[in-house]
Amino acid sequence: MSAAFMNYVRKVEPYVPGDQPNFPDMVKLNTNENPYPPAPAVEAALHDLSVDSLRLYPDPVVSKLNTAIADFYGVKPEQVFSGVGSDDVLAMCFLTFFNSKKPIFFPDVTYGFYPVWSELFQIPYEKKPLNDRFELVKEDYYAENGGIVFPNPNAPTGIALSVADIEDIIQHNPDSIVIVDEAYIDFGGTSVLPLIDKYDNLIVVQTFSKSRSMAGMRIGFAVSNPTLIRVLNDCKFSFNSYTMNQTTIAAGVAAVSDRAYLEETLAKIVATREHAKKVLAEMGFQFPDSQSNFLFVTHPDYSAKELYEMLKEQHIFVRYFGTGRTKDYLRITIGTEEQMETLYAALRAYFQR
């Protein structure tokens, strides 16, 4: 299209999510979803929801959910901001806090949405290379910048940075907002949530999509000091006041209420992950020591693309990125024990052919 108005259309390279196939016999290990259902209280909350209430707008400040999250994590409701998945929360953080002419910093191998939001909102950025072991180098984040964001544990590597190293980064950047994206923190590592009262430039973002089995409901949240949460809400209300619907709010409150179920589910996934490390290592795979609900694997004798295509033919779906430093790696979500055994059997059969 050559019309003049196309000169003023914003053009970005979009984030590409993992495949969402729909085969009855598939083993879906490609988008880091939780293989177990949400807490039983979630189903009960959905059954109890009044259909008549849907004619009314939802609570724009999401009071019930923010209070439930605050109670769970031992903070005040005014320290919590909720959004439609952590993607929505992070995007709003980018829009609100990254407005300097200085570049923001994030790793070169990390969550693929960071450069997309930077391009969309026209935020200058610099990718800081992970080292040869795919570890974040904290000293790279000491330079002058317009903000910092990184996942912990990182994605797609699964490597967790220590609280001491994260605190060191925060201390070296008193004039910049530091966002720690803890989408996978419940599976390993230690959250830096206790630091939010110590540092007024820290924002911690988490999600219900992984540990709480609610990727389909789209709930994410940020925790920080009341001042940063207030300006985040100001930006949200200037964009869309009613971002979270009543059904999602009800389900979210119910999910937070069941700590025992959360801990039980996490324990099963972590146990399956640790077993998977042993099995895949015996097959010759190499991978960082993941503290998330996935493994980032490579094999010296087989290309990642070859294994990806082989598994896909059998309706076993894992994530293949295919470019840059990740082109020789597959990211395998930790599924149920049964799903993982299906994966192992397919790999063993291929290697022994």
Image: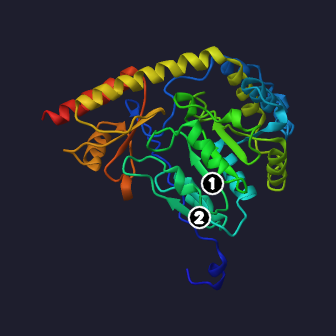
The spot of residue 292 in percent (x, y) is: 48, 33
Circle 2 residues within 10 Å: few <14, some 14–19, many ≥20: many
Q: Quadrant of the C terminus?
A: top left
The reply to whether residue 351 is in sight is yes
Could you say which quadrant of the image residue 12 lies in? bottom right
The answer, for residue 323, to whether it is visible in the render is: no
The CA span between labels 1 and 2 is 9 Å
Left or right: residue 105 versus residue 270 is right
Q: Residue sitting at 75 percent across and 56 percent down?
A: 96
The residue where tag 2 is placed is 125
Q: Residue at x 29, y 31 (%)?
A: 280
Residue under numbered circle 1: 148
Q: Residues within 10 Å of mark 1 (few under 14, many from 20)?
A: many
Residue 255 coordinates in the image, percent (x, y): 68, 23
Which mark, by number, is residue 313?
none
Percent coordinates x, y for residue 170 in the rendering: 65, 48
